[in-house]
Amino acid sequence: MGTLRLIRRTGALPATVATAIVSSNPEIQIDNRAWPTAEPGLPAAASGAAWLSAIAGTTVVVRSGFDDDSMLRAAVRTAVPVIVMRGREDGIDVVSFRQHGPCPHAALDIPERPGAAPDDGAGAVVAAHIAASEALVLIARAHTGGARARHVSIPIRADQIEGDGAAGAAETPAVRAVDIPWAPECFACGGSGVEMSFA
Ligand SMILES: [Zn+2]
C-alpha cells in the first residue's frame, strides 16, 4: 500500500525493477518525478522551490548520496524527516535527520555541491537496508531518545572484502551509531517552527 515517489536524475526506474517492486507490493503506486532543477536562466541554487514541490506530501525522504542542495532545507520547511545513505567500497554511512520544523525560515538557496558518489556494490545494498529500517522506525515513531539526528557508520576493510581472511577481530574497525547535534540554523525559531518572543 502507499505511494513510492521516485525522484531520479536518470529518469524512470528500469522496467525490471519497477516490476519487482509491484510484484512484492501489488497495491503500491509508483510516482516518478523529474529531478528538481532551477527554472531556466536561474542559478542552480534556485532549485529550492522545485524541491519543495517534489517532496510535498511525503512522509519520509530517503536519499542515496551526500550531494548538497536545497532538499534537506525543503524537508525542514515541511517537517519531513530525511534519511541520507551512502554505500561505498570502504564503508557505509546512514544519517537520519529526524523531523525538524515546520520552519518557514529554512533557506532554499543552497548551492548544489556533489558529494563522493555512492558505489553500486554490496555496501549500497546494506546501506539501503539500514535506511529502510530507519524509515520504518520513523514512520512508526518508534525511535527512542531525544536526538534530532543519528549517524550510523560501518567501515569496510578492503582486505576483508577481498577475502584473504588475514584480519583479526581486534583490527576490525568499529561500527558506530552516534547521535549528532544537527539542528537547522534558524535564528527565528531554532528549527522548531515556533517563533521565539522576547516580549
Ligand atoms: Zn524557523
Image (cartoon, rainbow, N blue to C red):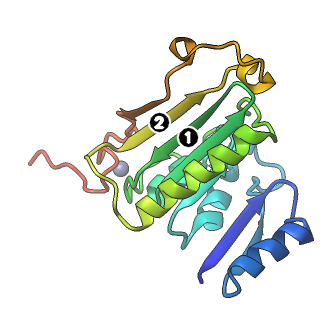
Q: Looking at the image, is 196 positioned above or below residue 31?
A: above
Q: Nearer the viewer, residue 6 or 179?
A: 179
Crowdedness near tag 2: few (<14), some (14–19) or many (≥20) residues, C-alpha within 10 Å? some
Position of residue 46 measured from the top left corner of the image (x, y, whole percent): 68, 49
Q: Is residue 69 visible?
A: no
Q: Residue drawn at (39%, 55%), measured in percent from left and top?
A: 99
Q: What is the secondary structure assignment of the residue under circle 1?
A: strand
Q: Is residue 43 left or right of residue 55?
A: right
The residue at which mark 2 appears reads as 151
Judged left or right of residue 55, residue 42 is right
| x and y percentages locating residue 7 in the rendered image | 73, 61
Amino acid carrying label 2: it is His
Is label 2's Cβ within 8 Å of ligand 1?
no
What's under tag 1, amino acid-wise?
Val
Mark 2 near mark 1, Cβ–Cβ under 8 Å? Answer: yes
The residue furthest bottom is 27
Considering depth in this image, is 183 or 194 the residue closer to the camera? 183
Q: Position of residue 89 (x, y in %)?
A: 75, 29
Q: Is residue 160 visible?
A: yes
Residue at image position (65%, 65%) is 54
The CB of the residue at mark 1 lies under 8 Å from ligand 1 = no
Give the residue number, with chain letter if any, for mark 1: 94
Which is more N-terminal, label 1 or label 2? 1
Q: CA distance from mark 2 to mark 1?
A: 6 Å
- Which residue: 65% across, 14% down? 167
Q: Which element type, helix, strand or loop, lies under badge 2?
A: strand
- The image shows residue 52 at horizontal and vertical percentages of 59, 61
In the image, taking residue 172 as reference, residue 143 lies left or right, namely left
Q: Quadrant of the N terminus?
A: bottom right
Where is 167 relative to 15, above or below? above
Residue under the point 87% across and 62% down: 11
Compare residues 145 and 149 and report the one nearer the observer. Answer: 145
